[in-house]
Image: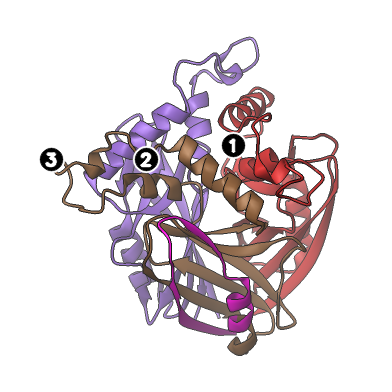
Chain colours: A red, B purple, C brown
Amino acid sequence: MKTKLETLALKTEEKQQLINITSKVREAVGSSGIRNGFIGLFSQHTTAALLVSEFQNALLDDIHGFLGRIVEDDRAYRHNSPEFSDCDRKNAASHLRILLFNYSVVLPVCEGELVLGQFQSVILAEMDGPRERSLKVQFIGQ
Amino acid sequence: MKTKLETLALKTEEKQQLINITSKVREAVGSSGIRNGFIGLFSQHTTAALLVSEFQNALLDDIHGFLGRIVEDDRAYRHNSPEFSDCDRKNAASHLRILLFNYSVVLPVCEGELVLGQFQSVILAEMDGPRERSLKVQFIGQ
Amino acid sequence: MKTKLETLALKTEEKQQLINITSKVREAVGSSGIRNGFIGLFSQHTTAALLVSEFQNALLDDIHGFLGRIVEDDRAYRHNSPEFSDCDRKNAASHLRILLFNYSVVLPVCEGELVLGQFQSVILAEMDGPRERSLKVQFIGQ
């Protein structure tokens, strides 16, 4: 049994962006030497998270629209108020939208291949970019 | 240490359905030969996911009601428009509701038994059925 | 490869409360004897769950506000009706709010240390307290 921890650095380009990282995850699996086990991806951030979903432009637009409807940008959030918070980014909406995504994603690896359904992609959900982001990538298996 | 990957096939019967799969998961644990470790369940779909919750009819009705309120069926989603999407299923609402559930569930196995709280069930959340669905089931342990 | 299952008992003090349990998780990692692998935390409850987020009072207030807006307390939920449910707690809103959190959290352990980003905390999300709660804590690694 082997474990292996790596860091995957990612650069985001927009305030709110959904980025397909499936090919990077497949590369990490390929170079890991793990044939069978799990790969875990772990966001190291509180306004960027992960998602397994279909990566289609029209659907991504719908996800952004949904996020904007359930978490309004212009509400009087305490996290955005200098009276209650020392955070200058005024990113309360980013933090709340993250609740819809996952801090981490664990995926199976079988015979050296990432196991994903036909329409599934691994997606980084940037909610407060643009920024340099990093994911920890942990393998466990043999 | 052993790993083992299986497929669990499931048939759903309604457009939107919450299905208790706990007994199937217990069976998979029983026949796995794993005594201590993790079992991971991984949806291979983008409109069917997983949930660990109480399985009570009245609560299931409330969950369906909640899903209908936060994601309306009749909005002008881009994913449902032939102008922006080649998907004929017009299932944008299904994709958005999936955000409330989990692509995967990892559960502990101890002394050959699935570890779950008294009121917890493992539930398949079908958001765009009826369909044939499959879960990958990955064990890691000894 | 070793696995190890423990129970972490927690006492909550409010109806709805977000509790920083990061130091307890670090203690569990320290005493586990696992140097490299995963720690999984598993709620044994259906109205208490887990979250990895920033633990800042102003942001916690915003999360509580958001939960109250997307799941109203005073709606005619079936789970709260003696006609449809034998649950006396009238806690349908608690069950629905849990959908925003995670039944479980898996985190990497590297060189004996819990791997978390600078602003990340592991948080217990109590949605129907005050109660005695317990998490199962499962390690896998070496």
The answer to whether residue C138 shows anywhere in this view is: yes
Instruction: Count all numbered tags in the image, as a single digit.
Output: 3
- Tag 1 subunit: A
Q: Residue at x 47, y 40 (%)?
A: C68
Q: In which quarter of the image is residue C71?
A: top left
**Labels 3, 1: one chain:** no
Q: Position of residue A43 (x, y in %)?
A: 71, 56
Q: Position of residue A16 (x, y in %)?
A: 75, 35
Q: Nearer the viewer, residue C47 or C31?
A: C47
Q: Name the residue under label 2.
A: C73
Numbered label attached to residue A119: 1
The range drawn in magenta is: C1-28
Q: Quadrant of residue A135?
A: bottom right
Q: Name the residue under label 3.
A: C83
Specify whether residue C11 is painted magenta.
Answer: yes
| Residue type marked 2 | Asp
Other residues around mark 1 within 10 Å, as few (<14) / some (14–19) / many (≥20):
some
Q: Which of marks 3 and 2 is in front?
A: 2
Q: What element carries label 1?
A: loop
Q: Position of residue A107 (x, y in %)?
A: 60, 57
Q: Nearer the viewer, residue A90 or A76?
A: A76
Compared across the picture, whether B66 is left or right of A16 comes to left
The answer to whether residue A121 shows anywhere in this view is: no
* Residue at mark 1 to residue at mark 2: CA–CA distance: 37 Å
